[in-house]
Amino acid sequence: MKNLRVLAILTVLSVLAACNRSNGIKPGDESGKTPYLKEYSNQVILDWNQVAFNAMGGATYQHSLVASRLNAMVHLAMHDALNAIAPAFKTYALQKRDAGADPIAAAATAAHDILLASFPDKKAMLDSALMVSLANVKEGDKLTRGKAIGKEAAEGIIGLRKNDGELQDPIAVVEPSTVPGIFQGVPPMAFVFAPFWKTMKPFGLTKVDQFRVAPQPALTSKAYADGFEEVKKMGELASKGRSAEQTAYAKFWYEFSEIGWNRVARTAAATKKLDLMGTARLFALLNMALADSYTAGWDSKFHYNFWRPYTAIRQAENDGNNQTTPNAAWEPLLPTPPVQDYPSTHSALGNAAATVLAGILGDKVSFSMPSTTADPSKPTRSFESFSQAALENADSRVMAGLHFRFSCEAGLGLGGNVGSWILKNHLQPQAD
């Protein structure tokens, strides 16, 4: 077990180091700062990140895939709107330039219009948020032009995502199977979620299977037996091997990844005192990486269609491995998500986010934050680096009884690849 944890740590650290080298960034650089729009606060980016969360339903929303897509659209539109005013980075969609537009009006309008297109029923709330953002912007030509450039930025992103199929029915029937290793629905969510997402158009990857992970260990292998025994012991609802601390962080990281890692970014942006343009780029790259990690993860999950620990442990008599023993009454600490085990997309999103954040800000950024799913008696956790948070996030899935360790390791590798690709190939600094 110790060797598996060491491998996971080395996976994260090697990916982060490679990312920093490829982008010419030294750990600790405040590379989210730019010489542009420095007189403006980054608060408009942070505010609309929170407005998007609230528009989607806050902590109660259920469709994490749609949420990640919308977060990417919101932040890409804000980035493009600001970049049109002070071109510091390569644009994503909008090619127009207007140095005379107001940046706060541009960013807020871009976010407002993206969200309004998805939530026309939330118009009153979104209009109110826009009024708050524009409260200190003087009336006049700059305001008018800022609104116009924001609207064009939003229209550009909406046009790119038109008819990408995100609103199909996400609840699908699981094909019954008696074949060992094949995914079966897990109560209380005995269905499979959004199978069409495995072909969703990526935001930054060239194709959905660009970083498809290698196969999981064979059922008859020692590696499988080791992963089986660990999650059986540590992830059980009534586990005697899991510590109170491990239980606490299993619950802490249970919330949807895009919720948690956007919170990490808000905290880090405040800690590092990023400027407006740097913050816009940070959130755009982060949410591109999160959205594409879901898509790439769904591609691998549906390709391998591997069973969850719940099924594997209850049906171990059929797996052909004499080192595993069944427990027909086994229950995980937390409810199992309705999608295949391998790889862990939760781990993938965590390391994709950590890779982007470390690539821009340096890895060793200390932060503390709460979680929507934390135990009320332990509402916050503190970290010394993004990689530390990503490792704990991945480990939490084993402690919660949701994933085999090898699925989390594969997810860490996948997320690192996605995050590195996004950083290297999108929103790069403009050549002088």
Image (cartoon, rainbow, N blue to C red):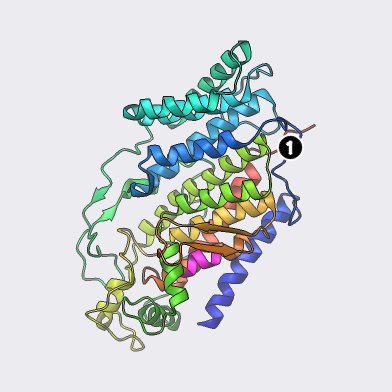
Q: Specify whether residue 222 is painted magenta.
A: no
Name the residue carrying label 1. Answer: 34
User: What residue appears at the point 54 percent right and 16 percent down from the top-left corner?
Assistant: 148
Q: Which residues are magenta?
A: 390-395
Identity of the residue furthest to the top in this view = 141
- Observer-nearest of 276 and 417: 276
Mark 1 Cα shell of 10 Å, populated few (<14), some (14-19), many (≥20): some
Task: Left or right? Give the position of 194 relative to 283.
Answer: left
Residue 396: horizontal and vertical position, in percent? 45, 68
Task: Left or right? Give the position of 77 relative to 232.
Answer: right
Magenta region's main secondary structure? helix
Residue 347: horizontal and vertical position, in percent? 48, 61
Query: How many discs mark residues in the rendered view?
Result: 1
- Observer-nearest of 425 and 127: 127
Residue 44: quarter of image = top right
- Observer-nearest of 43 and 408: 43
Residue 115 position (above or below residue 230): above
Residue type indicated by callout 1:
Thr
